[in-house]
Amino acid sequence: MPVPFAFVCIRLFASIDSSIWEIECMLEEYIQFIWYTGHFIQKRLQSTTGEDVMVIDQGKWNDASGPDFSNAVVRINGTTWVGNVEMHLRSSDWSKHGHQTDSAYSNVILHVVCEDDEPLYRSASEPYRVPTVILNSEVLSLFQFEYERWVSVKGRIPCEDVLPETPKQTVEEWLETLAKRRYRRKEELGQEILESKFGDIMLAEIVVSADAFGKPLNSEPMRQLANQVPWYKVFRKEWTWTEFSKWLLSMSGLEPFDEFHWFNLWGVQPLDGSWWKYGKMRPTSFPRVRVVQWARWIYVRFYLKKVHLVDIVNRPEEVWDEEYGGVVPGVQIRNTWLINMYPLAKVIGQLGGWEEDTFSWNELKPDQNKIVDQFVAKGIVVVTANDSQAIIELSEAYCRYKKCVNCAIGRYHLKKIKYD
């Protein structure tokens, strides 16, 4: 008789304004965490079909796609199996998630669930029934109270009360992992941009700079603008700075334009001005200001050919000089632009002959924003952009979605409860 798991959901329903789907996904992560704690190690269990099951090694938690745990070691009726372990709320979720047609799940040796509502077979064509183990209420309740308290927190940091008590090594290692992950993802974006421009370094750098100048709200329309402009045709024309800035503003849809003239002269249509977002930003960050600042960077960098990429910070007077005449970007926003451009520029620079060491976040000052400030207030040390970008990754990918059981800091404190 399957053990009800509704008691785990009741408080989640009461405390979270979320859909049933989101709650169940959160609960599934909780099941994964219970397995991760190793509570089953050397414990004798029994499958739903009466087989003796002993967990020798619960395996490695898989943060990517595919089965939840890999390289697990489980002894079933005296035979030792090495393979993957998958977690679900109900056995029927296996077919709902399409695992029966996914070869990545062909090596699952054990299925762990709260409710066994249908027999599980490895695939539609294979009659082998995957052994299934049901979690009992005692196991589920081990960390239940603290876990539910965290996911109900409305603040940005669910574990803020215990965050200062986290061992320094745990925090440093986790933040370094997150920084590398974030940097790598931005490098991949740079590679995608370069490939989309067929290896053209200039065009790729224009799109990369557009992405950075548009953050946090307008990266998408800025990239669209960069992709839509016929740059080689544009650079063959003689421009004054005033002409170029007005032209790019009209191309962005933020200034009036003659549609017939535009299409016949340049072969493209300007952007729709409604694409730009304003949100809760200061006037100095409005789309029109950002487009003009970016236009100046493009004009000096690629039309006048006076500066290098890093001169956004090192020699700003060469870019936003007296001729510019607009809102000069502050030190912090220029640093933020450079932080976002570095990983993408590193990929482009490999073809341009630039020194790869130039593009390290450890060489840049940290971001200054509310997210970073909240973690600093809790004792997290931030010295370089590598530190601040790791914190932003932690906040955006884990704290925001209450994925505490997937976070090294959350795992440390939840596991610690067992021994307190």
Image (tube, rainbow, N blue to C red):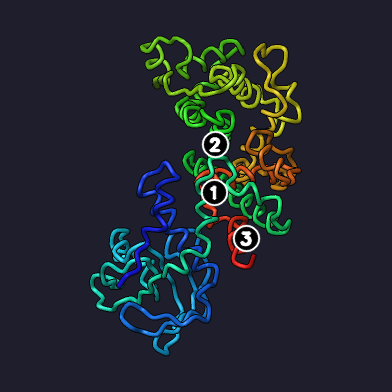
Q: Nearer the viewer, residue 127 or 380?
A: 380
Please state the horizontal and vertical placement of residue 233, each as a whole percent of the image: 49, 23
Nearer to me, 323 or 128? 128
Give whichever of 57, 249 is nearer the camera: 57
Check if mark 3's residue and mark 1's residue have beta carbons within 8 Å: no
- Quick one: which residue is furthest to the bottom in this view? 78
Disc 1 marks a residue whose amino acid type is Tyr
Q: Secondary structure at mark 2?
A: helix
Sequence-wise, the earlier of marks 3 and 1 is 1
Work out whether 81 lies above or below 204: below
Q: Which mark is residue 204?
A: 2
Disc 3 versus disc 1: nearer the observer? 3
Q: Which residue is mark 3?
A: 412
Q: Is residue 295 visible?
A: no
Disc 2 marks a residue whose amino acid type is: Ala
Choose top left, top right, bottom left or bottom right for residue 388: top right
Instruction: Give above or below for 223 relative to 1.
Output: above
